[in-house]
């Protein structure tokens, strides 16, 4: 499988810089335009002359995360009520339900001295939250869906990268692997749709769930493929994004003892609260390692963007990963410094530009799951850091992988130590 791996140098993901320098090609054959200016990002994300285009859709289907126009509006109308904007706590119960499973796996690893796969464990946790809150069904805490889901994401990530970055050659073997991984994923997607059609696995849960609405509204017209593409899209959107943020965050704490010590102290002093430093650590991780490291758009008509004239069908990469580290916007952009997000003498932290920090996107496609994601992160980090220390396994280098999302290397393993047993 073509997986684009990169050394993480300090915190810098080298491959992003190298790929940009090596040149790119959009679906029209013309180079991709990288946007690393927040003012231009705002124009692209809000502008009527840019839409999501055809590239991602051709690999991932026409689900909510990849579609635009009337089709997207209709699907958003269907899914939105499962994420009510006025009830940001709608999915809190799914998080508190799933978290003990993750903590138990940490406990066992600490007790037995065994190592844990960072990506595998964090995806197992976020998948359980997603299945319960969004697909209306509960998975056991040692469920085996992780490999299928990760393999599928890795394989489409590989094709997308190779399409956009011609320096990465895609061979016939990779294509047949993609077909195999997609087929395995389809089996899982059909299984989970069948389970939901039979009713919620927890009959006491009377909340509106996204899959229930999709089955009712998209599936009623016999559009089984439409139901599948929404499930795939929600899986891409909601499983790996939060898990990768949590994974990078644990790795940052393992390599930045000052930040880790401060977070431990502040959490110990506020047993049931959420000290501002907790959010600061989460935001700093989202700044340095935005899971959605780029947002692609295509011009729907000739348009001027800054000092460039774009033809119709040009591909634009709104490069969250580059903007989040732009030296004109951030002091010491490659340093992990959560304190930059703390309130100062003039009140709450303010970004240097509205689109200097936008891990959840913006404009009409603003992330639907952002409240869910923040709950997943806050509660997991709070409970993990209170009880455990996570340590790198020295022999395994800290690498990142770049695909549809940015993630810690899949082979990274960590040791877990119960804090009561570590010298403080
Ligand atoms: C840390 C975790 C997450 C990050 C960083 C993140 C980031 C993003 C970003 C940047 C977008 C905009 C993409 C674009 O403009 O093309 C987006 C869209 C979306 N996200 Fe998230 N997301 C996260 C978690 C979640 C979760 C947990 C869900 C729940 C299912 C979710 C559901 C969605 C959906 C459905 C969209 C498409 C919205 C639309 O186009 O109408 N996300 N996300």
Image: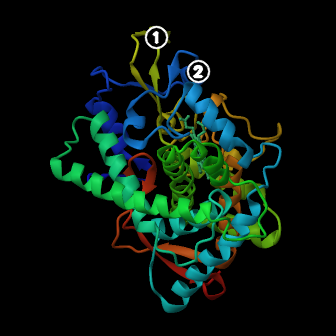
Find the residue positioned furthest to the left: 172
Locate residue 248 relative to residue 173 in the image: left or right. right
Q: CA distance from mark 2 to mark 1?
A: 20 Å
Q: Above or below — where is 363 with respect to 278? A: above
Residue closer to the observer: 157 or 317: 157
Disc number lying in front (2 or 1) = 1
Q: Above or below — where is 360 with respect to 413? A: above
Residue visible at 26% across and 32% down? 22
Q: Residues within 10 Å of mark 2 (few under 14, many from 20)?
A: some
Residue visible at 31% across and 21% down? 28
* Coordinates of residue 151 in the picture (x, y in percent): 36, 60
Locate residue 391 relative to residue 78 in the image: left or right. left
Q: Which mark is residue 301?
A: 1
Q: Which mark is residue 39?
A: 2
Is residue 298 at all visible to an observer of this figure? yes
Is residue 256 at all visible to an observer of this figure? no
Q: Residues within 10 Å of mark 1 (few under 14, many from 20)?
A: some
Disc on the earlier residue, 2 or 1 = 2
Classify residue 350 by image quadrant: top right
Tell me if the residue at label 1 has its CB under 8 Å from ligand 1: no
* Coordinates of residue 303 in the picture (x, y in percent): 48, 9
Q: Quadrant of ligand 1?
A: top right
Q: Above or below — where is 271 with respect to 196? A: below
Classify residue 147 by image quadrant: bottom left
Find the residue positioned furthest to the bottom: 112
Q: Judging from the image, what secondary structure is the residue with disc 2 in?
A: helix
Residue closer to the observer: 64 or 151: 64
Q: Above or below — where is 96 with respect to 275? A: below
Classify residue 274 by image quadrant: bottom right
In what quadrant of the picture does the C terminus appear?
bottom right
* Coordinates of residue 258 in the picture (x, y in percent): 61, 63
Asked whether the residues under the numbered discs 2 and 1 touch, taking CB atoms below 8 Å apart as contact, a structural biologist would say: no
């Amino acid at each position: 499988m073509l997986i684009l791996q990169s050394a993480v140098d300090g915190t810098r993901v080298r491959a992003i810089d190298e790929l940009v320098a090596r040149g790119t090609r959009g679906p029209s054959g013309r180079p991709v335009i990288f946007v690393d200016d927040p003012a231009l990002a705002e124009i692209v994300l809000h502008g009527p002359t840019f839409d999501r285009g055809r590239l991602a859709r051709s690999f991932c289907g026409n689900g909510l995360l990849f579609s635009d126009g009337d089709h997207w509006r209709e699907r958003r109308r269907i899914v939105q009520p499962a994420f009510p904007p006025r009830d940001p706590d709608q999915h809190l119960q799914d998080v508190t339900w799933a978290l003990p499973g993750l903590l138990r796996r940490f406990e066992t690893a600490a007790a037995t001295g065994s190592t844990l796969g960072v990506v595998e464990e964090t995806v197992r946790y976020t998948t359980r939250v997603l299945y319960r809150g969004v697909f209306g069904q509960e998975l056991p805490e040692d469920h085996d869906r992780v490999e299928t889901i990760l393999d599928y994401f890795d394989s489409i990530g590989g094709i997308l990268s190779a399409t956009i970055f011609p320096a990465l050659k895609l061979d016939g073997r990779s294509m047949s692997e993609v077909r195999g991984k997609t087929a395995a994923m389809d089996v899982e997607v059909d299984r989970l749709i069948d389970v939901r059609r039979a009713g919620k696995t927890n009959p006491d849960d009377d909340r509106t769930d996204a899959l229930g609405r999709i089955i009712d509204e998209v599936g009623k017209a016999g559009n089984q493929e439409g139901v599948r593409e929404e499930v795939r899209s929600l899986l891409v959107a909601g499983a790996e994004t939060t898990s990768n943020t949590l994974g990078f965050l644990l790795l940052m704490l393992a390599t930045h003892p000052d930040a880790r010590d401060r977070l431990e102290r502040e959490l110990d002093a506020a047993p049931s609260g959420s000290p501002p430093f907790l959010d600061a650590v989460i935001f700093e991780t989202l700044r340095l390692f935005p899971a959605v490291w780029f947002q692609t758009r295509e011009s729907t008509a000739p348009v001027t963007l800054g000092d460039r004239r774009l033809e119709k069908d040009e591909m634009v990469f709104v490069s969250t990963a580059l903007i989040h580290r732009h030296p004109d916007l951030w002091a010491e952009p490659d340093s992990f410094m959560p304190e930059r997000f703390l309130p100062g003498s003039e009140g709450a932290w303010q970004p240097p530009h509205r689109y200097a920090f936008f891990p959840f996107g913006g404009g009409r496609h603003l992330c639907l799951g952002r409240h869910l994601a923040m709950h997943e992160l806050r509660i997991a980090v709070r409970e993990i850091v209170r009880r455990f220390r996570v340590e790198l396994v020295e022999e395994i280098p800290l690498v990142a992988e770049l695909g549809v999302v940015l993630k810690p290397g899949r082979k990274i393993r960590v040791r877990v130590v119960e804090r009561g047993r570590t010298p403080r």
